Image (spheres, rainbow, N blue to C red):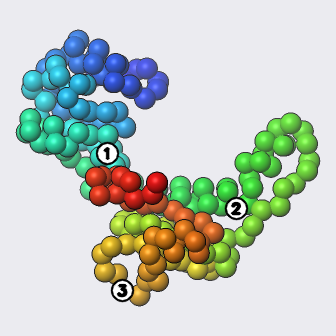
Amino acid sequence: IFNEFKRPLNDNDLIKIFKVYPNIHGIIAGLENYNIQTLQNQKNLKAISRVGVGIDSLDQRYLSSKKIRILKLTNELSESVAELLLTLILISLRKILPNYLLLKKKVWKPIIGNNLKNKNVGIVGYGKIGRKLHMLLKLFKCNIFVFEKKKIKYIKKLSLKKIFTKCDVVCLSLSLNNKTKHIID
């Protein structure tokens, strides 16, 4: 069964689909919510495979209680996500979006942005994505600081409070779970 809506599925979409197709054995999931409400009609489901790294849209406790396995890609998209973070940093610093919107209105009034060189960049979370982002940022000769609870060698670590006071740019690359959910208010 393919998503033919050409948009992300919401909870009601999933409930309707699963009522029509109650004998699904496996799901290749996007970012839809899979929980007790959306999966209530699925009695034969054995596994949900997530395309990507995040599993915060999966009710892990419920899936575990029903013995439904969660599978993640081994060649997940951490490099793509790190590149996207770098792109968003550059778009923000260089004022690309405001300049683009002015050009669409046929107005040439450049808004001057900033270089990434010599900026203080904080990376909150130093897992696969954080490490790959760090490698990309080194090419721009910026000052990189990391907030990470695990021990890491040869990296400038700062407290979360110092990351937010010292850094010009802060990137979040944490898994969303109960320990990280309210790390930033």
Q: In this view, does 99 lie to the left or right of 30?
A: right
Q: Name the residue under label 1.
A: 56
Task: Give the quadrant of the N terminus.
Answer: top left
State the mark number for residue 153.
3
Instruction: Tell me which residue sits at (74%, 53%) in the image.
Output: 96
Q: Is mark 1 on a helix, strand or loop?
A: loop
Res 4 visible: yes
Q: Residues within 10 Å of mark 3 (few under 14, many from 20)?
A: few
For badge 2, the amino acid type reads Leu
Q: How crowded is mark 2: few (under 14 residues within 10 Å), some or many (20 or more)?
A: some
Quadrant position of residue 50? top left
Residues 24 and 39: in front is 39
Q: Position of residue 138 (x, y in %)?
A: 55, 77
Mark 3 vs mark 2, CA separation in Å:
29 Å
Q: In this view, does 116 lie above or below 60?
A: below
Q: Mark 2 points at which residue?
A: 93
